[in-house]
Image (cartoon, rainbow, N blue to C red):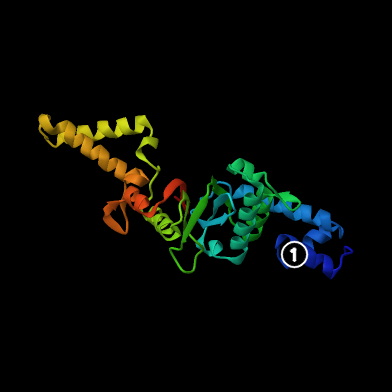
Amino acid sequence: MADFSLEDLKTLRERLGTGMVDSKNALVEAGGDLEKATEILRLKGAKSNAKRSDRSTSEGLIAAVESATATTMIELACETDFVAKSEKFIALGNTVLQALADSGAETVDAALATKVGSGTVESVISDQAAVLGEKIELRRMVRLDGDKFSVYLHRTSKDLPPQVGVVVAYTGDDAETARSIAQHISFADPQYLHRDEVPADTVENERRIVEEISRGEGKPEASLQKIVEGRVTAFFKQVALLDQDYAKDNKLAVARVLVDAGLTVTGFARFKVGA
């Protein structure tokens, strides 16, 4: 029998969140060496994670945290809603989020390499994936700089963590309207702030499609271009925030709501789990 104490067993379980039997077996295999037992369990977990690498992750959570000059938002993905609502998974999300906010990471690659304790975000996620028995991945992250922020996290079910998250960076003093704009974004899902940001080739492709549709509908040639431009304008209202009809009053454009409130949106991000 390997020489280890109940305190060693407790420490190992708390360190990795593994079960009693796996922790005990690892200590036996390691001859009572706590650090070697930790390594054994992590390697075992890594092998299990590799087997899960081709599984889909359609569940998870969105989380965000503000600082004085930036807001960081993440999508942490898993396989099932059972894991998504577990305390361990939610705690993992908070750990990862805070580490990224503190580090200033701006890309997923930089995020995964961020230090957390004696490891990295990647290793912490891998360890918890082994504990929870599912593929877990940091699917997306964004760090948005700005003057002021409005964060809106939406729960699609009371049993689950937030599934939709929006961050709006803005200038101005009307926090209530800024939050309303964040809620609008969660519903309307704009892809760009204003129409000038839409890539020219995307606009031209849309124009070509609607012109072909209009001709197929037998629209008169004399009014064809006017009809096409009207449909391109409708496209902008789908994809550009400032062109959209305001969700709370569709007689107003979002741009008008912002002007009336003395607000300027300088950037935004929207994540939805699995989308």
Quarter-of-image position of residue 193: top left
Amino acid carrying label 1: it is Arg
Locate residue 102 relative to residue 221 in the image: left or right: right
Residue appearing at x 18%, y 31% in the figure? 225
Q: Secondary structure at mark 1?
A: helix
Q: Quadrant of the N terminus?
A: bottom right
Q: Position of residue 164 (x, y in %)?
A: 46, 56
Q: Considering depth in this image, is 153 or 148 the residue closer to the camera?
A: 148
Residue appearing at x 61%, y 54% in the figure? 97
Q: Position of residue 85 (x, y in %)?
A: 54, 65
Locate residue 18 relative to residue 180 in the image: left or right: right
Q: Which residue is mark 1?
A: 13
Residue appearing at x 54%, y 52% in the figure? 73
Locate residue 59 relative to residue 127 in the image: left or right: left
In the image, residue 213 above or below residue 2: above
Q: Considering depth in this image, is 21 or 190 the residue closer to the camera?
A: 190
Residue 110 visible in this rendered orientation of the protein: yes
Q: Position of residue 136 (x, y in %)?
A: 58, 53
Residue 57 visible in this rendered orientation of the protein: no
Q: Position of residue 21 (x, y in %)?
A: 74, 66
How many neighbours does mark 1 have within 10 angstroms: few (below 14), some (14-19), or many (20 or more)?
some
